Image (cartoon, rainbow, N blue to C red):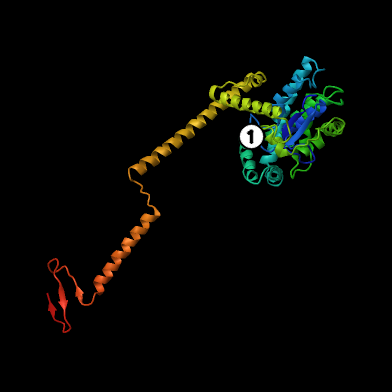
Amino acid sequence: MSAPYELFAWGPYWGLPSFDPFCMSIQCYLSLACAQWVSTTSSNPKISPTGELPLLRDATIPVAGTTNIIRHLKRKGHDLDIHLSPLEVAQSTSYINLIETTLYEARLHTLFLDAKNYNEDTMRVYSKSLDFVRRFYVPEVLKKRVVKRLAGYRMVLDDSLQLTNEVYLRAAAVFDALSTKLSTKRYFFGDKPTTLDAVAYAHLALHAHPLLTNARLHAMLTFRFPTLVAYVERMRAALELYPGPLPSNKSSQASLLSVFAPWSASKLSHADVLNATNSRVHAVAGSVRWFLTGKLQPELEAAMTDEERTRMKHKREAQINAVSKWGSVAGALAFFIGFVVSQGIVQINFAGDDDDGEDDDDKEREGEVEGKTSGHESTTNEGSVGERIVVDEDGNVDV
């Protein structure tokens, strides 16, 4: 039996397996597909080749991103859409695109641009998920990205002539389209769950929870789209009947390290260690080759679309530019410091030299004091150099 998949995802919150809808989408898909998998909570997207979670590890092959993971699982025989017609597959893709763009942006606005939600809820979620240092700056970094992403939305009047952000009007339109598609069916395409059900439930469940300080999306679903609220509850109950993640005998830290050293958390034979080492060396060599030549490992390149290859090409060019930039800065700084020191513009005095200088100054001051207090003898600049003036006891002066 093949080893189970390992899913690295953001941790649970609000009573849900993950507070990230994309991570939760893959968790739901794996359960609905009855795949064997283990779950590893992670708060470090940098472990992923694309810098994002979720990340699925299939043996030694990492697959990042919701779309790539679902495509990979379908190739492995876990296809929830196998019974759909080409037209239904196209419809499913369109609905998923609306969910992962419009509905996701409405959630981003709720979490990051609503002041009360951001200060009282969003910060609390990330504070419990991130380490002590990153919890102070990661939410602000994410907020700046959200502001940039949602900059195109305007403030408009809704049907009740209330001023609202356009993102919520578009979200309501998507809710309406999903509600119409679902109608009275158990799932979106009949009696069997599909990819659309996994993705829709993951996003709608996060929209439907009433635990935010300003639960605007929850109020919208409850009062205007009760069909979707009932669907969320129905899916929540149905998922309890499907197999969840397998129990893991490894700690989260060990599982995280297993991306780089699969033998670190278990006792393996010498041959297994050698094989795992060869795999890791091959992966590292592939990363170095990609940076230097732009060529990926064959199995990774075969699983990528043209758009993903273009994005990886731009990422490599950006990394090369960054290395060149900082290399030039470091070289210029080293040259400047060497020039300044070699020309004597800046002198470096050591502790011994300072002590000798202080001793010389002390000796000079002692000599001056002796010259001024040596009985009745003194020197003057008014006479010729070397003349002595002597004053006897009666006050007579002899030269």
Residue toward you, 183 or 377: 377
- Secondary structure of the residue carrying tag 1 is helix
For image coordinates 36% across by 48% down, the residue present is: 347
Residue at the far front: name it: 270
Q: Is residue 142 visible?
A: yes
Vertical placement of residue 162 versus 304, above or below: below
For image coordinates 56% across by 22% down, the residue present is: 294
Residue toward you, 346 or 393: 393
Residue 67 locus on image (x, y percent): 71, 25
Horizontally, is 230 left or right of 391 in the view?
Answer: right
Number of marks in the rendered image: 1
For label 1, the crowd category at 10 Å Cα-Cα, with few meaning under 14, some 14 to 19 and many 20 or more, is few
Q: Quadrant of the C terminus?
A: bottom left
Horizontally, is 393 left or right of 95 in the view?
Answer: left
Horizontally, is 214 left or right of 135 in the view?
Answer: right
Q: Quadrant of residue 232?
A: top right
Q: Quadrant of residue 33?
A: top right
Q: Amino acid at mark 1?
A: Lys
Q: What residue does disc 1 label?
A: 46
Residue 147 locus on image (x, y percent): 62, 37
Vertical placement of residue 279 versus 371, above or below: above
Residue 127 locus on image (x, y percent): 69, 45
Q: Quadrant of residue 396?
A: bottom left
